[in-house]
Amino acid sequence: MQATTLVHRMEDLFDQGLESQAGAALLRFGAARQRQDDRIGWSGDGAAAWFDDARGHVWSVGEPEAAAGLVLRAAHVLPGQVREFTGPRRTDVLVGRHLAVTDVVEWVFRWTLEEPPVHRAEERVVELDEAHHEELLAFLNEHSPDHSTGPGSSDVTLWVGIRDADGRLVACGALSSLRDSGAPLMASVATDAGLRGQGLGAALTSWLTRHAIRQHGFCTLWQLADNSPAERLYTRLGYRNEDPCVAARIATR
């Protein structure tokens, strides 16, 4: 795997036109949305990568072999700073030949530019504020203990929910943002475990998607690769499925 020279100008990440190609939506909606002149990046051989120094995270897109080479380059020139990475599938295997890799999770980065059809239950969706954070946290801990984003997160711009006839919260979800660009990111959509299959999650997801598109022109989300119900729902709502990714940590020795 051959890595190219370290660059410091975000424009260099776009020399190959990767941001307009299938499988490079992370570049298009991530780095391309906020080109910071002082952000460190790498490009070449059909891949591009950039460093989120706040998290110690390297994001990469493109051909797996080249993307892995850029992750390794980052770990070499920024010793001790690169703690985790996201890249196209197989990046973890290729990086793992040279560095100890742990906590591997396969994802699909999904996105849409189109408003979905209106779901019949969208009229039940209501916005929630800080006064509801304790209620939201209790609900998520019970019905979605592995939620990615919690109430009070600085990345969240909006929480919404659905209540039953007695006023009890039965579904919730948030609009967060990609940390490296601020792009809208749907997160922590959860439904009461006893009420799943009734379309509550679909209504929330549809509402949040529509809100994000009207505010920003698009919406993004992360889907676990082995989540078949989510796969079917997001496909029905028009989310593209062309960015299979893998995330992992680089183990410290």
Image (spheres, helix red, strand yellow):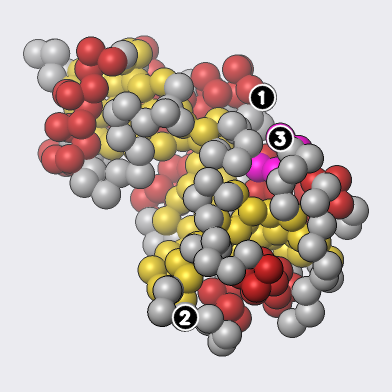
Which residue lies under the disc numbered 2? 100
Whether residue 11 is visible, yes or no, is yes
Check if mark 1's residue and mark 2's residue have beta carbons within 8 Å: no
The residues colored magenta run: 30-35
Q: Residue at x 60, y 58 (%)?
A: 58
Q: What mark, if any, has residue 175 been given in the picture?
A: none
The mark total stands at 3
Residue under numbered circle 1: 217
Outermost residue, left direction? 166
Instruction: Specify the farthest residue to the right.
Output: 15
Residue that protrudes farthest toward the bottom in the picture: 97
**Would you say 16 lies left or right of 118 here?**
right
Gap in angstroms between the C-alphas marked 3 and 2? 31 Å
**Residue sitting at 45 percent across and 51 percent down?**
223
**Figure check: 105 above or below 65:** above
Question: In terms of sequence position, does the residue under pointer 1 or pointer 2 come before the other?
Answer: 2
Q: Which amino acid, by three-letter code, is at mark 2?
A: Ala
Residue 228, image x and y in percent?
39, 56
What SS does tag 2 mark? loop
Q: Nearer the viewer, mark 1 or mark 3?
A: 3
Q: CA distance from mark 1 to mark 2?
A: 40 Å
Quadrant showing the N terminus: bottom right
In the rendering, at what x and y percent does residue 131 appear? Answer: 23, 13
Q: Please, what is the three-letter code of the amino acid marked with disc 3?
A: Gln
Q: Is residue 204 left or right of residue 55?
A: left
| Disc 1/disc 3 C-alpha distance (Å) | 15 Å
Residue 152, percent across and down?
Answer: 32, 27
Q: Is residue 185 left or right of residue 114?
A: left
Amino acid on which the number 1 mark rests in the picture: Gly
Q: List the residue tagged with mark 3.
A: 34
